[in-house]
């Protein structure tokens, strides 16, 4: 049985690269400058306006994995059981689909609300064929275990982010370094590609520990 944890990091596309109709559509409900800035920042959340800059994968069984990340130069190295490999967005998507094809189960945190649709839509936009349906039947944990849905009993109770859940369960938070998802876009602009990749790896290990807690104590 191969169970794979995966996670992605995204950045907004350049707003000025959009045509006038797209710009108008995005900003039509933003009345103040503050609201316009907020909308532009939120572009990292949506597949038509974002770019995937890192995809991390980790085996639950072995604790080893890989992070494929976007960089201006080709890089390949290994650290703490994680193999790092860089390429452009299309290339890292191809690597992801090749690897996930061998997984029997996959684990995410908010994967249904973010990672999975972004991976599938960005792949289609870049003409990369997905090897697996990442959005199977929602109310089953046989193939896809979205921990946010499991720990909120399918949104029956309040949602908390990964950092909050890790602290509540006594698991080392991946945000302990001081980096959060809000820092990815500025880091990308500063060419801190390896730092982004290693931050992504931290999320993988934390998600794996949270999954094991769910599997051992909450799965029926």
Image (tube, rainbow, N blue to C red):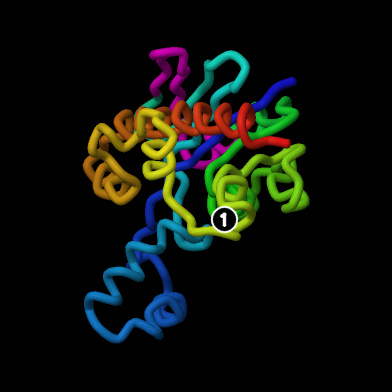
Along the horizontal axis of the image, is 194 left or right of 34? right
Looking at the image, residue 129 sits to the left or right of residue 168; the answer is right
Q: Quadrant of the N terminus?
A: top right
Q: Is residue 178 magenta?
A: no
Residue that badge 1 annotates: 113
* x and y percentages locating residue 49 in the rendered image: 46, 62
Q: Secondary structure at mark 1?
A: helix
Residue 187, percent from left and from top: 26, 42
Q: Which residue is at a point 64% across and 30% down the rendered structure image?
A: 215
**Would you place residue 41 above or below residue 33 in this image?**
above
Camera-side residue: 161 or 80? Answer: 161
Q: From which residue to which does the magenta span run?
A: 75-95
Instruction: Using the rendered image of the protein, determine whether residue 95 is visible from the camera's viewpoint.
Output: no
Q: Is residue 6 left or right of residue 102?
A: left
Residue 155: percent from left, percent from top: 59, 59
Label 1: few (<14), some or many (≥20) within 10 Å?
some
Residue 87 is inside the magenta segment: yes
**24 to 159, vertically: above or below:** below
Between 92 and 64, the residue placed more toward the observer is: 64
Question: For the point 69% across and 45% down, which residue is it?
Answer: 134
- Quadrant of the image occupied by residue 219: top right
Q: Is residue 89 above or below residue 51?
A: above
Decide which of 29, 131 is in the foreground and name it. Answer: 29
Residue 12 found in image quarter: bottom left
Q: Going 55% across and 30% down the picture, which residue do you hit? A: 213
């Amino acid at each position: 049985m191969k169970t794979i944890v995966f996670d992605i990091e995204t950045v907004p596309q350049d707003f000025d690269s959009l045509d006038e109709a797209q710009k108008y559509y995005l900003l039509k409900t933003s009345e103040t400058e503050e609201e316009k800035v907020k909308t532009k920042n939120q572009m990292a959340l949506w597949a038509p306006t974002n770019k995937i800059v890192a995809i991390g994968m980790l085996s639950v069984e072995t604790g080893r994995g890989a992070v494929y990340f976007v960089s201006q130069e080709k890089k390949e190295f290994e650290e703490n059981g994680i193999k790092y490999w860089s390429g452009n967005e299309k290339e890292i998507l191809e690597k992801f689909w090749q690897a996930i094809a061998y997984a029997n189960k996959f684990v995410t945190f908010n994967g249904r609300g973010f990672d999975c649709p972004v991976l599938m839509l960005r792949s289609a936009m870049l003409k990369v064929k997905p090897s697996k349906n990442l959005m199977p039947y929602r109310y089953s944990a046989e193939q896809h275990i979205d921990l946010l849905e499991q720990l909120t009993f399918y949104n029956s109770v309040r949602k908390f982010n990964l950092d909050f859940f890790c602290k509540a369960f006594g698991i080392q938070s991946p945000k302990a370094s001081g980096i959060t998802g809000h820092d990815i876009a500025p880091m990308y602009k500063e060419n801190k590609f390896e730092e982004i990749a290693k931050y992504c790896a931290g999320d993988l290990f934390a998600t794996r520990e949270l999954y094991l807690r769910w599997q051992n104590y909450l799965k029926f």
